[in-house]
Amino acid sequence: MRKLVCVMSVMVVMMSCGKDNAMTSPEQPMPAPVASTPDPEAQALVALYDATGGEHWRDRSNWGSDRPIGEWYGVSVNSENRVVGLNLAYNNLAGEIPEAVGQLTALRELDLSHNRLSGNIPESFGELENLSALFVDSNKGMTGPLPAALLGLTLKAFWTYDTQLCVPEGEAFGEWRNAIANGYGMIGCGAERSLLVAFYEHTGGPGWKRSDNWLSTAPVGDWFGIETDETGAVVRIVLDDNNLRGSLPLQIGRFMHLQELRLKLNRLGGTIPKELARLEKLRTIEFGGNALSGPIPPELGSLSHLEDLALYENQLTGPIPAELGQLGKLEWLSVSRNRLEGSIPPELGDLTSLRLLFLYGNDLSGPIPSQLGGLENLTALELHDNRLSGEIPSELGQLRKVERFILSDNELEGSIPPELGGLTNVRTLWLDSNRLSGQIPPSLSDLDNLTVLWLYNNRLSGPIPPELGGMESLTRLSLSANNLSGDVPEELGRLSDLTVFLVRDNAALAGPLPESFLQLDLLVLWLSGTEVCIPMGTEFTSWMDQIEDLQGDLRCGAAPRAARSVRTARSVSVDLDAEERMLRCDPGY
């Protein structure tokens, strides 16, 4: 019914679309086709039958019989008994279309789609001066440039998708193609196939891990890593971890229907072509884990349908283009582990669809834009391992959906905003290795889903807030290398899931470890560099013996002893800073 609707809208003069009007009947034994007949149109039909394996057709009712040709399956005739419609779609035709079909000069519609035809469209089709609709789609074996004879036809519908037929280059064919109101799958000769060949050559194709069907005569949709749409246009190129090397050719900007371009974990070098900005339908660019260099093209900001831009783990330099803030549909932006410089563009705060923002592992500097607090759909904010400075914007506390909030290893100053207590879904909060000062805000106790809190290596002062004992989901807590004072609050013994507790190198932290800690199944306890002591008694002695890694086991009322470290199935690192970093995310805890 699909072609009946499409064709009737542009072919009011046609008597029938054939496909829906043709009566199908069960296959019956038929006599052999007539070898010769005085009717030239019957001769042309018999030639088609013979050339396309008629004896194996799904339905060959009356073909070759002495019945009028208008009663042959799929044939429609006019009042003069001239063939005006021929519908043999889905009929198991195999072989090449014979030149004799060009004798059906009254033909208006020809549907040979969804068969197993091969070869090209015959030159004789140029004689079909009344032809308005031609369907040869879904014949994967049909190949080659369309014959110039077709330029004399005024087609209103022409479908070639899922074939290897192509429209020759040149002004004449260009005007002819543009005049077809219902054209489907008409790809220019040498267009995408030659573009893929260029891509293959530029990226070391002979050395790929897999290159099934590449450079063969198979439809490009059968080439490894390539997906085409129903028109035969390339819509996906996915060649992850396939040993691509070399550089991306500029011609990649000519895949006008491309929606996904995934080339991660290869060895591609060179720059990112700004020509990608021409691909208006592009939704995904993933180039992570290559050796791409140079700047991020600001032209990518014009890709209005882009949802994923993943350029992580390359050698990109220069700033993050402010133009990326125009990508209104972007959900994932990752430029982590490159060599990017400059500040974070405030325009990124306009990416209201953004869910994942990964800028870590660069050389970014300057303040964190307060505008990022408007990213209401953000679930991960990772800005660590840069040179960001200034204060943490209080607006970031508005990120209600964020689960990972990581600002560690920067040069951030000022106090921890109490507004961060509004991160109600956060599970991981890393603020370590900055220059943060002031007291730990008790509002952090509102983070009911928080499992990891890392405040190590700052300039925080004052007591440990007893309110932190209400963080029921907390499993790992590091307050090491700060200026905290007072004792360890008894309320921390309520953290029933806590396995890692680090407070080392807080010289003014003192007093006995609360008895409530006996309820905790700690695996790691670091007290060295503090005056915190462990009470005497068999209960605490037994409890200490179950801790795998204990640093600073000063017993209350006893002479100081050398720190001991006991581990099971783990080696002890002499670099406590490196150990702190490892413990932030070690799944073993």
Image (cartoon, rainbow, N blue to C red):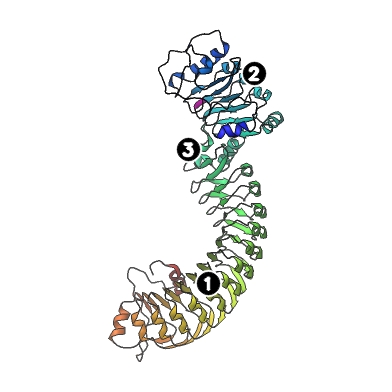
Q: Secondary structure at mark 1?
A: loop
Q: How busy is the neighbourhood of tag 3: few (under 14 within 10 Å), some, or many (20 plus)?
A: few
Q: Quadrant of residue 532?
A: bottom left
**Residue wearing tag 1:** 423
Q: Amino acid at mark 2?
A: Glu
Q: Nearer the viewer, mark 3 or mark 2?
A: 2
Dot 1 and dot 3 residues touching (CB under 8 Å): no
**Residue wearing tag 2:** 127
**Residue wearing tag 3:** 212
- The residue at the point 38 percent across, 72 percent down is 572
Q: Which residues are magenta?
A: 112-117
Q: Is residue 368 left or right of residue 403?
A: right
Q: How busy is the neighbourhood of tag 2: few (under 14 within 10 Å), some, or many (20 plus)?
A: some
Q: Estimate the x, y position of residue 17 in percent, counting from the top left.
A: 57, 27
Q: Nearer the viewer, residue 572 or 123?
A: 123
Distance (Cα) linking label 3 and label 2: 40 Å
115 within the magenta span: yes
Distance (Cα) linking label 1 and label 3: 49 Å
Q: Nearer the viewer, residue 106 or 68?
A: 68
Q: Nearer the viewer, mark 1 or mark 2?
A: 2
Q: Earlier in the sequence, mark 3 or mark 2?
A: 2
Residue 169 sits above or below residue 67 on the image = below
Magenta segment main secondary structure: loop
Dot 1 and dot 2 residues touching (CB under 8 Å): no
